[in-house]
Amino acid sequence: MSEKGRPRTLFDTDSDSDPDPELETRDYDQVIKLWARIRIGIRIRIEIRIRIRIGLRQRGDMRGYLIAAVMLCAWRGLDAEPLGLNYVFPAGCRRGSSCEVEVGGNWAGNTLIPGVSGEGADASYKGAVYTYVPEKAGAKGVKKPRYTKSALPGYSVLNMNVAPAAETGMRELYVEYRYEISNPVKFEISDYEEVIATASNRTSGAKLALSTLPLCLNGRVWNGKPDHYQFKAMEGAKIVAYVRSEIILPGGFVPDLQILDAAGAVVADGVTLYHRASAPVLVFEVGSTGEYTLCVGDPTGKGGRAAVYRIVFGELPLITDFSPRCLTKGSSENVRLQGVNLKQTRVRLFTGGKDATMCMQSLAGEAFVLPGLRFDLVDERVVNQVEPNLTAEQAQLLELPVVVQGACAPGVTSSGFYSFEAVAGQELYIDVE
């Protein structure tokens, strides 16, 4: 039977996929400031001694522990790996809707009990994930192979139900299998329209035309072939492709992002790609009105069931930098924002009664924030680097203790000189963050 001659579902797979050439990648020039915060002060040396008592218990006391340990090892197995949940696809659902998701891990069967953190969302087991294995040709004269439907161990389909009143944001999804609970993976609840790329031909990737933006794009890269999302953009627009890095497990799949023009050529002008290796965020400043394509691929050229991505795509407000990044607890100051599509570039921040996370939320509002940006509150006085201070004669005078904020560009060798007073016998400490 041909590929078109058998039924296919969202979570089907092929067992005879052809190998594919490596996916071409391209580096984009980008300028990212590397911020350094230096904490300088005087502290008194404090020694903390820890005493550990080591000894033997009576034989009668130890016997129960040894028996329990042996029974536990015999039941669990000395070489058994802990229950692992590797991915969920799609990795999100719109508020007030229901969807089916596929999960994959290292369990031996298919039936499991799922769970979701927070209120307003629940998951239930629906069934197994099936593959179609081609059989050899049958009787003489039968040229078309037949396909056998077989369940894949370690893969399951879940039903997700999200209430209209559920809070948006990241949740944790986990599964229970044979009295063991897996590690959690992130699952997002949002108000964006969800688009799921289901590649009808997994040897060439999915191709979808997007009529409206913003959207949340859900897909996975099969056989290393990229997915393509076609969209129209007006001159001067600033389009953002924001990868939800929270769903990426350590060492997991990181998508590669590119913009193509109508002729299929890679667009470099006006494209800035941040954190390509870990949490990609692409900003495209459209130079001319026309049709473009967002290309989502796998830089390793492999792909597969676990090569899952989730991208918020559109003219999104994005904060790429802000200053200052640190304030003294209880103080207030105007914070300057940098980015694209921002409603305001200056925010008056009051830190009284807030922690660092709450301050960051006040700064961001509804805007997306470049991964890795953070705000800190400290007990010490905070001052900014005063330039020029490139020589000892230009050294900036500091009154300790203090936190100094400064910046340097990547690839530039420079020095900053600071002067301060200290008393003999005091210990100087310098923490660089």
Image: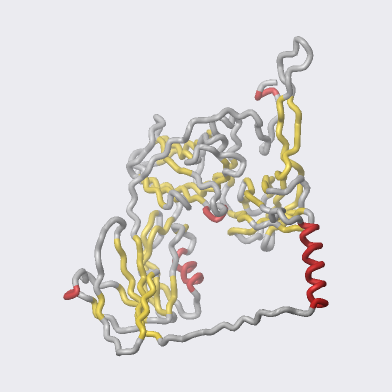
Residue under the point 48% across and 72% down: 356
Q: How many marks?
A: 0
Q: Position of residue 23 (x, y in %)?
A: 46, 35
Residue in view at x 63 percent, y 46 percent: 89
Residue drawn at x 50%, y 76% as measured from the top left: 354
Q: Position of residue 289 (x, y in %)?
A: 37, 38
Name the quadrant of the C terminus.
Answer: bottom left
Q: Nearer the viewer, residue 431 or 199?
A: 431
Q: Is residue 176 visible?
A: yes
Q: Quadrant of the N terminus?
A: top right
Is the image coloured rainbow, by chain, by secondary structure, or in one colour? Answer: secondary structure
Q: Residue at x 75, y 13 (%)?
A: 142
- The outermost residue toward the top is 141
Is 59 left, or right, of 189 in this rendering?
Answer: right
The location of residue 161, given as percent across then percent down, is 70, 52
Query: Above or below — where is 146 with respect to 240?
Result: above
86 versus 369 height, above or below: above
The percent position of residue 21, horizontal first and vertical second, equals: 49, 31
Viewer-proximal residue, 269 or 376?
Answer: 376
Q: Is residue 351 left or right of residue 41?
A: right
Answer yes or no: is residue 163 visible: no
Q: Quadrant of residue 14?
A: top right
As drawn, 36 above or below 381: above
Above/below status of 75 relative to 309? below
Is 167 on the left or on the right of 228, as rendered? right
